[in-house]
Amino acid sequence: FISNPMAFPVVSTEYIVTVTDNNGCSDADTMEVNVFSLQIEGDTTICQGDTIEFPLPPGTTFTWDPTTGVGGGLDTALLFPNSSITYTVTATNTLAGCITNGQISVNVLPSANANFTVKYMPGCDSLVVRTFNNSTNANSYLWSWGDSLKWSELYNPVLFLPYGNGREITLIAVASNGCNDTLTIDSSNVVFDDSLMAMVPNVFSPNNDGTNDCFRPEVAGWFENCFLLYVYNRWGELIFESYREGHCWDGRTKAGNFAMEGTYFYVAKVRDLEFKGYVQLIK
């Protein structure tokens, strides 16, 4: 039996103390010795732009050297360096005053940089979107759009988005080391009217000289199945009609005769939009 024992536990330990007097009567009590022990060491690898969460034990303060890329609160430290770095960490237990030191090395891998722009072209049933991939430090790509069930691994895919809501376009660019970056563009606010542009000449000369021989409104978009063109003479008679994009009026009537010089009225329809005006036929 030891009347004044000393304990040197390496881990937190609960001791039972029993006291016995000369009469053989005894009593017991327990004592818990908490050992401040904290492992601060190890290397880790992250992608540039990522964050590591480092939980902090209660009753312990931490100092970091350097403080570059260090944040967080009382219970969690956040490490987000932009380049590889080694931290020297000092942990102090505020209850016992114990201090321990260690090092943490963070290897930061360069990440891909996702970047792209788009060009909208209206179509009969959907918005046609040309993508222009400007990503850097990437060697593979994953596009998703619409309801996210559509995807492509092409470098610059052409997308067909329904008119209305839910038309986000997302690009995930992946570097050779597996680090990735994501960029999303919301196209929901682009409507049919906004993306439609029409260039309509006001004069043409169907004389087979290779210049302005045919009258055709130039509409930016894909309208193979929803483009209509009507041409009327001054008496309101329909002398030409076309039901497909790219078909132009060569100056002939529906009977195949050459129309006379003069002013003619046209109506071009694209879906539910109409472009009306006059064109001068000269020879």
Image (tube, helix red, strand yellow):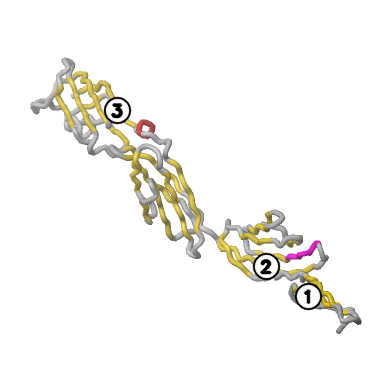
Q: Amino acid at mark 1?
A: Tyr
Q: Amino acid at mark 2?
A: Ile
Would you name the residue on which mark 2 appears?
Answer: 104
Residue 90 belongs to the span the image colors magenta = yes
Q: What is the CA distance from the residue labelled 3 to the residue labelled 2?
A: 65 Å
Prevailing secondary structure of the magenta residues: strand
Q: Nearer the viewer, residue 214 or 246?
A: 246
Q: Which residues are magenta?
A: 89-94
Where does the image place residue 168, in percent across and percent down from the top left?
A: 42, 44
Q: Residue furthest top?
A: 235
Q: What is the CA distance from the residue labelled 1 to the residue labelled 2?
A: 35 Å
Q: Residue furthest front?
A: 23
3 or 2: mark nearer the eye: 2
Splitting the image into 4 quarters, where does residue 190 fall?
Answer: top left
Q: What quarter of the picture does the C terminus occupy?
A: top left
Residue shown at the point (63%, 65%) measured from the top left:
106
Where does the image place residue 20, in percent across and percent down from the top left?
A: 87, 79
Q: Please, is residue 93 above or below residue 136 in the view?
A: below
Residue shown at the point (43%, 59%) measured from the top left:
140
Q: Residue furthest bottom?
A: 1
Q: Amino acid at mark 3?
A: Leu
Q: Please, is residue 63 above or below residue 15 in the view?
A: above
Answer few, some or many: residues within 10 Å of disc 2's Cα (few below 14, many 20 plus, some between 14 and 19). Answer: some
Would you name the residue on which mark 3 appears?
Answer: 273
Element at label 1 = strand
Q: What is the CA distance from the residue labelled 3 to the residue labelled 1?
A: 88 Å
Would you name the residue on which mark 1 appears?
Answer: 15
